[in-house]
């Protein structure tokens, strides 16, 4: 995610890399949280601990089962 933005922009410098990686991490964290919330809704479950919710959201990015 961060690498593709840097290549598309053409400005690849250490400070810019750190900034884009931080932005990408925040975006991934947001997607994980939203995915966990959606999984809870689909399963009809509520009140799970935030870490359990994040774990559910991480399953969206799992590549092997």
Image: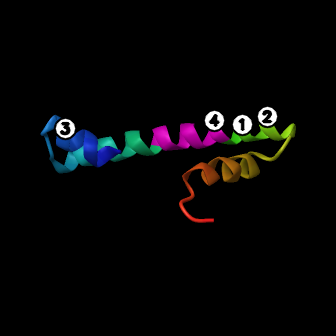
Circle 1 residue: 37
Q: Is residue 24 left or right of residue 56?
A: left
**Separation (CA) of disc 2 from disc 1:** 6 Å
**Separation (CA) of disc 3 from disc 2:** 36 Å
* Dots 4, 1 in contact, CB < 8 A: yes
Magenta-colored span: 26-35
Q: Is residue 11 left or right of residue 43?
A: left
Q: Is residue 52 above or below residue 24?
A: below
Q: In front here: 19 or 65?
A: 65
Is residue 36 in sight in this rendering?
A: yes
Toward which corner of the image does residue 45 lie, by quadrant?
Answer: top right
Q: Nearer the N terminus, badge 3 or badge 2?
A: 3
Circle 4 residue: 34
Is residue 46 in sight in this rendering?
A: no
Q: In front here: 18 or 1?
A: 1
Total numbered circles: 4
Q: Main secondary structure of the magenta part?
A: helix
Kindly report which numbered mark, 2 or 1, lies closer to the viewer in this rendering.
2
Res 8 label = 3
Element at badge 4? helix
Measuring 13% from the left and 40% from the top, which residue is drawn there?
A: 11
**Separation (CA) of disc 1 from disc 3:** 32 Å
Toward which corner of the image does residue 2 lie, by quadrant?
Answer: top left
- The colour scheme used here is rainbow
Query: Residue 55: horizontal and vertical position, in percent?
Result: 68, 53
**Separation (CA) of disc 2 from disc 4:** 11 Å
* Dots 3, 2 in contact, CB < 8 A: no
Query: Residue 59: horizontal and vertical position, in percent?
Result: 63, 53
Element at badge 2? helix
**Separation (CA) of disc 4 from disc 1:** 5 Å
* Dots 3, 4 in contact, CB < 8 A: no
Circle 2 residue: 41
């Amino acid at each position: 995610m961060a690498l593709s933005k840097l290549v598309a922009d053409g400005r690849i410098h250490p400070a810019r890399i750190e900034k884009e990686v931080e932005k990408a991490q925040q975006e991934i964290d947001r997607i994980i949280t939203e995915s966990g919330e959606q999984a809870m809704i689909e399963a009809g479950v509520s009140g799970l601990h935030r870490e359990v919710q994040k774990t559910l959201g991480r399953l969206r990015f799992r590549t092997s089962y």
